[in-house]
Amino acid sequence: MNANDRLIQSARYEICVQGYLGDRWAGLFEDMTLVSDATQDTTTLIGVVPDQAALHGILARIRDLGLPLLSLTRIADETNPQRKGDPEK
């Protein structure tokens, strides 16, 4: 697998933003699960993003809505973990 192949692979992400987003916001982030924490005034979007272009689209929507981005985490694929030392295929 080369660097370009990694860029177009889907990956699971957790994107945390400042602000409580209720159910009415879910349609803006289709295919993402919204987990809101009213006590912390944050919302985490969790889901599989098909490629880098889709990720940039989500981030642009967050920016356009004026939501402060707190964190972006790519979550390892636990169904097919690549052990340290294994050659990339």
Image (cartoon, helix red, strand yellow):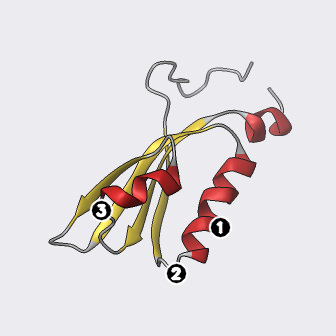
Q: Quadrant of residue 82?
A: top right
First along the sequence among labels 2 and 1: 1
Three-letter residue code for mark 1? Ala
Q: Residue 19 in the image: x percent, y percent?
A: 33, 75
Where 16 sits versus 5, above or below? below
Of circles 1 and 3, the one toward us is 3
Which of these two is toward me, 8 or 34?
34
Check disc 3 and report its element: helix, strand or loop.
Answer: loop
Check disc 1 and report its element: helix, strand or loop.
Answer: helix
Where 2 sits versus 86, above or below? below
Mark 1: few/some/many CA within 10 Å (<14, 14-19, 20+): few
**Rendered-image quadrant of the C terminus:** top right
Asked if disc 1 and disc 3 are in contact, CB closer than 8 Å, the reply is: no
Three-letter residue code for mark 3? Gly
Where 56 sits versus 54, above or below? below
Task: Report the side of 19 relative to 3 (left or right).
Answer: left
**Mark 1 to mark 3 CA distance (whole Å):** 19 Å
Task: Report the side of 29 relative to 3 (left or right).
Answer: left
Task: Report the side of 38 relative to 63 (left or right).
Answer: left
Q: Which residue is mark 1?
A: 60
**Mark 2 to mark 1 CA distance (whole Å):** 10 Å
Three-letter residue code for mark 2? Gly
